[in-house]
Amino acid sequence: MKVEERKFVYRVFLSFVIFVSILLIFLGGSSGSTGNAILNVTSNVSLLNFYSISFSENLSSGINFGEILNLPAVNVNATANYISSNNGTGYYIAVSGDGNVNVDFCIKASGDLESVAGDVLGLGNESYSNSTYTNETLPPPIGLSLTTSFVKSGENIPSDGTGVNYYRFWLDVPSGQPAGAYNNTVTFKAVPTTSSC
């Protein structure tokens, strides 16, 4: 190869290297090609509402209707419906005093009560009522049937340390219902007051 050709090839090669380097700088942004670039950014969050709830031991243990011996059975009380000294309920959710917003409670069930054998006790047979006070008559003995969608079940419960929402639960079992252990899941949710479930 002649000297002139080598110089030409060298210039073309050098021009190519410079072009690629410039291209990499522009395509690589500010990170450079050394791997030593550092960028500090701030992350932000604003917490508008905060609250904390706790479940009574009875509610945490589940809603138990015991053993039902005779059918039909109407308005069978859950075992902790009337257990406190004033015949109040043992099922409740308390709102702690360290929140900044009052709370609404929502409730739903997973579906019908079902046995291991696949027998079904319709969800319309399971009902509840709620109140912010409990004694022999509160929550009232007239309940609403559980549904598979969240519905409000206690509204504007204070977050000042005194806020409690009490529950009672009942079960109806029609004649001819097959024997078995039936269950479903009842879910509770707390939301800031006036928020939807």
Image: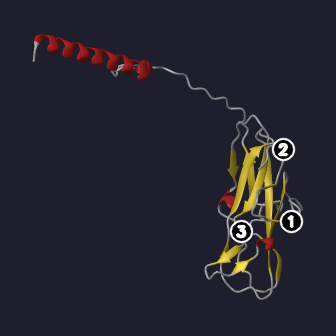
User: Mark 2 or 3 closer to N-term?
Assistant: 3
Q: Amino acid at mark 2?
A: Asn
Q: Which residue is mark 1?
A: 143
Give the label, 1 or 3, closer to the camera. Answer: 3
Q: Nearer the viewer, residue 105 or 111?
A: 111
Against 59, residue 178 (above or below) is below
Which callout, 2 or 1, points at the residue further toward the start of the chain?
1
**Residue 156's mark?**
2
The numbered disc on residue 68 is none
> Does residue 41 appear to the left or right of 141 in the view shown?
left
**Mark positioned earlier in the residue sequence (1 or 3):** 3
Q: Nearer the viewer, residue 51 or 12?
A: 12
**Horizontal side, residue 45 vs residue 191: left or right:** left
Q: Quadrant of the N terminus?
A: top left
> Residue tagged by mark 3?
111
Residue 168 position in % (x across, y down): 80, 63
